[in-house]
């Protein structure tokens, strides 16, 4: 805390008045010069000390004000930087979301975006299964997908319909989301490893709506926790290298 400047000013004024009174006594002959000197010297010294203290306090106040101003400026700069970073993050997130939406189509809109869909025939298919509440591909899953994807490089005019499913455990909304994530994991693996264009994929998560085995047994639930991949082509049989349905062997239930 700094000393009260008003108090210092009042003390200084009283001392100055006292000094002036002594000087008047000197002029009227009521005191000797030595007496006046002995009385005024401490007053002058005290006045000088008060002046020095006032100057010091002013400097301290100015320094404190400068530091506060600098701190406010730095805080504002930090806040501006944080705001800018947040805006950039939001923009990046928005771009990523748009890219993800554009990366694959939805299988349930297949008929509306693929011309002459009736001319597309299934030429190959496979499926992979997942553990309970899992959406990550295992090594066995990847090997299964590798066998299926080996034929894509030599195939023409095809699309891939990717359907994710779940068992009956859990709510409908949870299983829709889980099945979607499972299908997305398959799409990402095939697209990145085999450089398959995004427009080739049509993806949907059907949750627990369509079971392929009874959910009353552990083996049946394991089969329902799957992603099915169908390769559809509109090439005539004589022109397509994949002229028959190739169903990959199902992996053991997990």
Image (cartoon, rainbow, N blue to C red):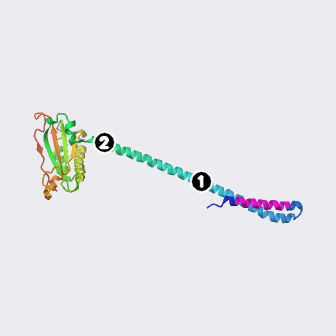
The residue at the far right in this view is: 29
Q: Which residue is mark 2?
A: 99
Horizontal placement of 78 versus 136: left or right?
Answer: right
Q: Residue 81: in sight, yes or no?
A: yes
Magenta span has 76? Answer: no
Badge 1 element: helix
Separation (CA) of disc 2 from disc 1: 50 Å
**Considering depth in this image, is 215 or 26 the residue closer to the camera?**
215
Which segment did they paint magenta?
Answer: 8-24
Which label's residue is closer to the chain start, 2 or 1?
1
From what the image shows, is residue 30 above or below residue 191?
below
| Residue 47 position within the rendered picture, expressed as x and y whole percent measured from the top left | 74, 60
Q: Quadrant of the N terminus?
A: bottom right
Q: Quadrant of the C terminus?
A: bottom left
Image quadrant in which you'd find residue 219 = bottom left
Q: Main secondary structure of the magenta part?
A: helix
Q: Which residue is mark 1?
A: 65
């Amino acid at each position: 805390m700094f000393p009260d400047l008003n108090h210092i000013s009042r003390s200084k004024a009283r001392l100055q008045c006292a000094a002036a009174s002594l000087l008047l006594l000197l002029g009227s002959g009521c005191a000797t010069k030595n007496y006046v000197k002995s009385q005024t010297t401490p007053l002058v010294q005290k006045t000088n000390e008060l002046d020095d203290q006032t100057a010091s306090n002013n400097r301290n106040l100015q320094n404190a004000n400068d530091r506060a101003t600098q701190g406010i400026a730095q805080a504002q700069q930090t806040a501006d930087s944080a705001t800018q970073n947040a805006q950039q993050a939001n923009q990046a997130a928005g771009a990523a979301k748009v890219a993800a939406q554009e990366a694959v189509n939805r299988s349930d809109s297949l008929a509306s975006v693929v011309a002459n869909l009736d001319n597309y025939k299934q030429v190959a298919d496979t499926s992979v299964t997942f553990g309970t509440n899992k959406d990550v591909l295992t090594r066995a899953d990847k090997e299964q997908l590798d066998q299926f994807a080996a034929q894509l490089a030599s195939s023409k005019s095809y699309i891939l319909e990717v359907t994710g499913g779940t068992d009956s455990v859990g709510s409908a909304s949870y299983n829709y989301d889980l099945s979607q994530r499972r299908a997305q994991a398959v799409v990402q693996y095939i697209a990145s490893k085999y450089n398959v264009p995004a427009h080739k994929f049509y993806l949907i998560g059907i949750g627990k709506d369509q079971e392929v085995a009874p959910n009353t047994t552990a083996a049946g639930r394991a089969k329902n926790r799957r992603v099915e991949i169908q390769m559809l082509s509109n090439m005539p049989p004589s022109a397509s290298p994949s002229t028959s349905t190739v169903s990959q062997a199902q992996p053991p239930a997990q």
